Amino acid sequence: MKFFLKNRAVFLGIFFLLVAAVAVAPMFVMADVTGSGAVLKNPLGDTKTLESLIDKIIQIFLNFFAIVAVIYLVYGGFLFIKAQGNPNALGEAKTNILWAIIGLAVILGAKAISTIVTNTISSLK
């Protein structure tokens, strides 16, 4: 038992590596095998131009960071409830909630700017 407690980080690393391998494994099965060889489907969908590829990548990053900001907002709410009137803990919780809201505002602004730039570039063609 002491061996497992001493090497907890190693075992957690191996565990997360195995979970990641299981999560990524279906991606390799998505190959469409035809008579001329294996053809992989595009995971980004119908991206035929550079603009659509860049837009897709930006949308993926913005969606990811929006999820992180919402999780951070929930964490701030948890800290707010956990504070139970302690002024220092309440201040930390309010700061976390404030920064999560600022992060969400920045993400929404970036999404709006990305959409405006993409539409402007598309209309110039």
Image (cartoon, rainbow, N blue to C red):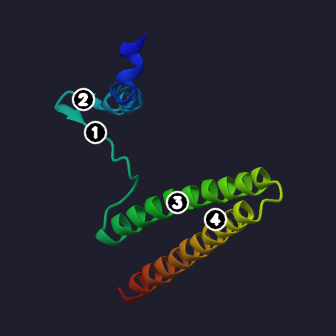
Q: Position of residue 121 (x, y in %)?
A: 39, 84
Quadrant location of residue 58? bottom left
Do residues under tags 2 and 3 come within 8 Å of each other at their CB atoms? no
2 or 1: tag closer to the N-terminus:
2
User: x, y (%) of residue 109?
Assistant: 56, 79
Task: Give the mark, 2 or 4, whose residue is nearer the N terminus.
Answer: 2
Residue name at image x 31 percent, y 67 percent: 49
Mark 2 to mark 1 CA distance (whole Å):
10 Å
- What residue does disc 3 label? 63
- Regarding mark 2 in the picture, which secondary structure is present there? strand
Provide the residue designation for mark 4: 96
Q: Residue at x 60, y 71 (%)?
A: 99
Q: Mark 1 against mark 4, which lies toward the viewer?
A: 4
Disc 1, SS: loop
Q: Is residue 110 left or right of residue 55?
A: right
Residue 13 vertical position relative to residue 97 in the rendered view, above or below: above
Q: Residue at x 66, y 60 (%)?
A: 73
**Foreground tag (2 vs 1):** 1
Q: Do the CB atoms of the residues marked 1 and 4 lie less than 8 Å apart?
A: no
In the rendering, which numbered label is found on residue 34? 2
Query: Between marks 3 and 4, how big is the CA–CA gap?
Result: 20 Å
Few, some or many residues within 10 Å of mark 2 (<14, 14–19, 20+):
few
User: Mark 4 is on which residue type?
Assistant: Asn
